[in-house]
Image (tube, grey):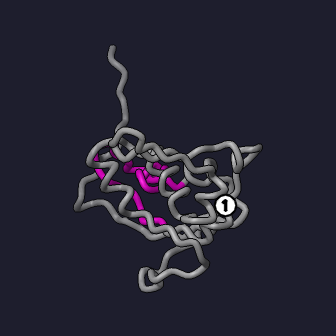
């Protein structure tokens, strides 16, 4: 006798509702905060999550300049960029990148946690990161996302 399995109805572009959330990065650990943001961008928090459909919500991250790293990562962690040319490798410590371009730290962390395909590239466009406490998305009436 076969067992019956319950599956939810597959989501599609017409049935998915995209909500807006705002996250305050003040004193948040980068990896812990970004893994939760990545789950919301993918839509894992919804009952009708479907892996091949963009079910995720929009996320606004504020105060990206006030995020923290655990341990000695602020000094030891290196962000590497390679231009493609010989000798074109540039390394930058996390504390220097956080001073120069704080949005990039959060963007790169979340991007690494999303699928590496066209769906992942579509998901990352639903995240907006700002170093300060203000954002231009007030018309979307974002709800606060607590961790």
Q: Is residue 122 above or below residue 139?
A: above
Q: Residue lying at the far front in this picture: please name it.
A: 87
The secondary structure that most of the magenta stretch takes on is loop
Q: Residue at x 29, y 49 (%)?
A: 119
Q: Residue at x 77, y 43 (%)?
A: 71
Q: Residue at x 47, y 84 (%)?
A: 138
Who is closer to the viewer here, 75 or 106? 75
Q: Residue lying at the far right in this picture: please name it.
A: 71
Q: Would you say residue 6 sits in the magenta stretch?
A: no
Task: Give how far across and how far down residue 46 sits, in percent.
Answer: 44, 53
Residue 123 placement: quadrant: bottom left
* Secondary structure beneath label 1: loop
Task: Give how far across and how far down residue 8 sits, in percent.
Answer: 35, 44
Task: Give how far across and how far down residue 88 sits, in percent.
Answer: 41, 44
The quadrant of the rendering that contains the N terminus is top left
Left or right, residue 146 beside residue 14: right
Q: Residue at x 62, y 71 (%)?
A: 63
Residue 27 placement: quadrant: bottom right
Left or right, residue 104 beside residue 16: right
Who is closer to the viewer here, 35 or 111? 111
The quadrant of the rendering that contains the C terminus is bottom right
Residue to which mark 1 is pinned? 67
Task: Give how far across and how far down residue 98 sits, in percent.
Answer: 61, 61
Q: Residues within 10 Å of mark 1 (few under 14, many from 20)?
A: many
Q: Residue lying at the far bottom in this picture: please name it.
A: 139
Q: Would you say residue 45 sits in the magenta stretch?
A: yes
Q: Residue lying at the far top in this picture: please name it.
A: 1
Left or right, residue 33 beside residue 17: right
Q: Is residue 3 above or below residue 145?
A: above
Segment colored magenta: 37-59
Q: Is residue 133 above or below residue 41?
A: below
């Amino acid at each position: 006798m076969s067992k019956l399995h319950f599956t939810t109805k597959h989501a599609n572009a017409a049935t998915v509702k995209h909500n807006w959330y705002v996250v305050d990065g003040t004193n948040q650990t980068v990896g812990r905060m970004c893994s939760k943001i990545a789950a919301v961008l993918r839509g894992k928090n919804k009952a009708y999550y479907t892996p091949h459909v963009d079910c995720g919500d929009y996320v606004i991250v504020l105060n990206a300049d006030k995020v923290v790293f655990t341990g000695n990562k602020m000094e030891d962690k290196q962000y590497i960029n390679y231009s493609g040319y010989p000798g074109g490798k540039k390394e930058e410590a996390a504390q220097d990148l956080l001073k120069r371009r704080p949005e990039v730290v959060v963007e790169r962390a979340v991007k690494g946690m999303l699928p590496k395909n066209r769906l992942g590239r579509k998901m990352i466009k639903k995240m907006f990161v700002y170093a300060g406490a203000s954002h231009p998305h007030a018309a979307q009436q974002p709800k606060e996302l607590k961790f």
